[in-house]
Image: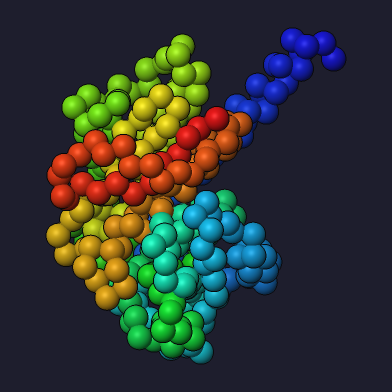
Amino acid sequence: MDEQTLNEAELSERDRSVEQAESLIRSRRSVRTFDGGRLSDINRSALEKFFKLITNPFGDQVEFKLLDAEKDGVTSQVIVGCDDYIAAKVKRSDTAAFAFGCAFEKLCLFAESIGLGTVMLAGTLDRDAFKRAMDLNEDEIFWCATPVGRPADKMSTIEKTIRAKMKSDERIPFHEVFFDGDFDHPLPDFESSADHPAKDDIVEALELARLAPSARNKQPLRAVCNGSTVHFYEQKGAGLTERPEGDIQQVDLGIACSHFLMYIESAGHQAELKYEDPKLSDDPSLVYAFSFEVK
């Protein structure tokens, strides 16, 4: 195989990988109405094996567990037709919420890939019951859980109501979320740059991060692109940052981070996590979180 043929083969493999990542992220939606069936042994085994493979760039270990609604006494008033749940916990740390969100979204995307629906639930469930089922210790945090099963053909009335109220299918426009160099210059959608060959992939990855689900669909993610480095920020929202568990919007940033990294890695790049606050904002509601340098 000559060099040109080899390069074309590598490009084809990259394109397939990128297409798969983008398709999976775009196809995933939050599911609250299921067909009433239980997980098959094959799907149960696949999920439990995947639990052990989930990593996150922040280094915190997130522990997952399959739960049975009747056996474990776990419930949610907004879920119809599902008795299988997955919950997770993580030890408290400065990065625990980011790690939790990133790892949990990886799980949800894996479930999507094998035909199962999920939805991250934080407030609309019996938190005490889930904490007991997870044997939660004082130094551990339970952020959310998800039902897991086959989506029903039609949404329940309560699901339709929730999605309409939260405007679940709407997202803040790209140019209001992502910026170039500082917060005074919106980042152009999909504009190429010869100076930074990875920039097209970075912009594509940010677009997929923009699609990430978030608590009450508040979409707290903001980011500044500085060459090949992306600085992630949290736009704090009232009523979500001061909870007993901590700031749930940091979980949302972890979810968005999962989408970003999935695309970046599928495109053949490496992303190095850094904590280097460029001090681009004096707004107390806009808080620096972390950065990734794409290589």
Please name whichever residue, 230 or 154, is drawn nearer the observer in this view of the structure: 230
On screen, residue 58 above or below 184: below
Please name whichever residue, 103 or 225, is drawn nearer the observer in this view of the structure: 225
Residue 88 point in image, percent of width and height: 48, 71
Q: How many marks?
A: 0
Residue 218 point in image, percent of width and height: 23, 52
Q: Is residue 5 visible from the viewing direction of this image?
A: yes
Residue at horizontal 25 percent and vertical 49 percent from the top: 287
Q: Quadrant of the N terminus?
A: top right
Residue 86 point in image, percent of width and height: 50, 71
Residue at horizontal 27 percent and vertical 76 percent from the top: 244
Residue 198 point in image, percent of width and height: 50, 23
Residue 154, picture quadrant = bottom left
Please name whichever residue, 183 or 116, is drawn nearer the observer in this view of the structure: 183
Give the left or right position of residue 175, taking residue 195 as reference. Answer: left
On screen, residue 108 above or below 206: below
Q: Which residue is the extreme one toward the right?
A: 1
Residue 55, picture quadrant = bottom right
Residue at horizontal 39 percent and vertical 62 percent from the top: 94
Q: How is the image coloured?
A: rainbow
Residue at horizontal 35 percent and vertical 30 percent from the top: 225
Q: Quadrant of the C terminus?
A: top right
Q: Is residue 117 visible from the viewing direction of this image?
A: no
On screen, residue 39 above or below 234: below
On screen, residue 146 above or below 139: above
